[in-house]
Amino acid sequence: MEENKDYIIGVELGPIYTQVSYVTFNGGEGDCLDIPTVACKRSGVNQWYVGQEAMENFQARKGVLVRNILQAAIHGEMIRVEERSIDPVELLGLFLRGCFSQVGIYRPGLNVKAAVITVDHFDKHMVDLLTKVKEQSMTEFEHVFFVPKEESLYYYAVHQPKEMFSYMLEVMDMSAGYLSLKKVEMTKRGYPIPVKVETEDHTEILYPTEMEPEDEQEILEDLDEQMNECMLLDLEGRIVTTIYLTGQPFEKEWCEKTLKTVCRSRKVYGGNNLFSRGACLAAMDKLSVSNEREFIYMGKEKIKSDIGVIRLEDGKEVISVLWDGMQNWYDAKAEFDFMPGEDAHLPIVILPLDKSQKRVVPVVLPADSQRDMKGRKFHCTMSMRSEKEVSVQVQEVPFGEFYKEHGRVYEEIITLGIL
């Protein structure tokens, strides 16, 4: 990394290994680093090491090794080290800062325009966890984004030569120790071209972390047979032009039978920087000023409707769109003040992207027997609890000299349809 350049950082955060990629903001030169997702506390002092440095200090008996950092943070399990309880979220933040330090992004003169963390099993709980890590450990970055690994794969795929993505593209991912198939498919109807990414986990196809030397060959031959049968079924009747293999287990030579199957009539590549590089490309797209898109990602975390509110303008009802569809549900937020009509409702409008019939959901406002509804004022805060649920929170605010707010917040949950 060089001084006086803007960089994008992509982090594939995994339970066993974490990979950090960086590129210049214009997508130029870059590199990546594989880092074991472990930390080691030096015995007797408050000093921590991460990644390979942690492994070396533990092997030299200089400290206590902590594995399963990500899993502990997800489950909220305190970590015991030398009779002390360690907050797993704080340790995860410490681990990430150690990763960034190893890449060299804290050197003077470097500017990180954006950092993107990409993970599996992306849900509201994961978003909340990563938000806490961001607030504790990533405040110096201009922008921080979170994306599922499927979205990182989408950005990686659409930046490949067109002949590699003419029909379907698939990834055999063993970065978590088991086989996870991620399938990329575009439908050539419409423009921008819709692209879907689906994940199919095969946790039964698990690469052992430890094997006795005398048993290793037999174990891996059985695993190869199991994976080969899985891939034969998966590829039957489908036109898959390109397959990527990613994850530490694929760096070893053990799955000869599976490779013969997947290499038949298609291109197969190693893709060890696939997700972290895709995260960098996602950041460049999110920060782009251009609205031109050849492809559009149809991920499950994308909102499939425009959401708005009906208001009066010159005596006519008009729809004000609060947020557009196809943005990530966890990024969708809106706040506004309003004065209701006599019907004491806040009409929320749902406009499905598939052009099916719009829905109007009248959110009922809290009654006050002593006051006329038209003389009251409310503040509304809207957000998404998931890709299918809209949270509408309404709170009365002071209006005029004689009425003070009571502070109570009323919430209604609106369920969106599934496209």
Image (cartoon, grey):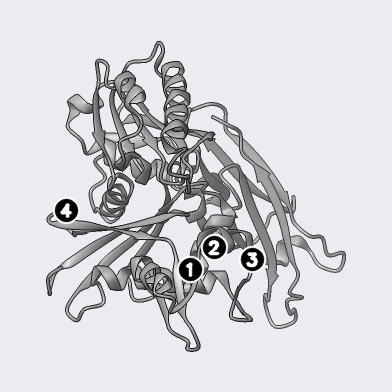
Q: Earlier in the sequence, mark 4 or mark 2?
A: 4
Amino acid beneath label 3: Glu
Mark on residue 92?
1
Q: Where does residue 291 sit, x and y in percent of width and height?
A: 26, 45
Do the numbered discs 4 and 1 sit on residues whose CB atoms are within 8 Å? no
Q: Residue sitting at 71 percent across and 52 percent down?
A: 412
Q: Residue sitting at 34 percent across and 66 percent down?
A: 52
Q: Say what secondary structure mark 3 lies in.
A: loop
When the figure is inspected, residue 337 is found, relative to residue 322, above or below; the finding is below
Locate the N terminus by quadrant.
bottom left
Q: Which residue is mark 2?
A: 129
Q: Which residue is mark 3?
A: 77
- For label 4, the crowd category at 10 Å Cα-Cα, with few meaning under 14, some 14 to 19 and many 20 or more, is few
Do the numbered discs 3 and 1 sit on residues whose CB atoms are within 8 Å? no
Q: Earlier in the sequence, mark 3 or mark 4?
A: 4
Amino acid beneath label 2: Leu
Locate the C terminus by quadrant.
top right
Q: Nearer the viewer, mark 3 or mark 2?
A: 3
Distance from label 3 to label 4 (Cα)?
A: 39 Å
Q: Where does residue 356 sit, x and y in percent of width and height?
A: 53, 26
Rendered image quadrant of residue 167: top left
Do the numbered discs 3 and 4 sit on residues whose CB atoms are within 8 Å? no
Q: Earlier in the sequence, mark 3 or mark 2?
A: 3
Task: Indicate left or right for 108 with 100 as reference.
Answer: left
Q: Say what secondary structure mark 1 lies in.
A: helix
Q: Where does residue 14 sit, x and y in percent of width and height?
A: 44, 53
Distance from label 4 to label 2 (Cα)?
A: 29 Å
Q: Say what secondary structure mark 2 lies in.
A: helix
- For label 1, the crowd category at 10 Å Cα-Cα, with few meaning under 14, some 14 to 19 and many 20 or more, is many
Q: Say what secondary structure mark 4 lies in.
A: loop
Q: Nearer the viewer, mark 4 or mark 1?
A: 1
Q: Residue sitting at 41 percent across and 46 percent down?
A: 175
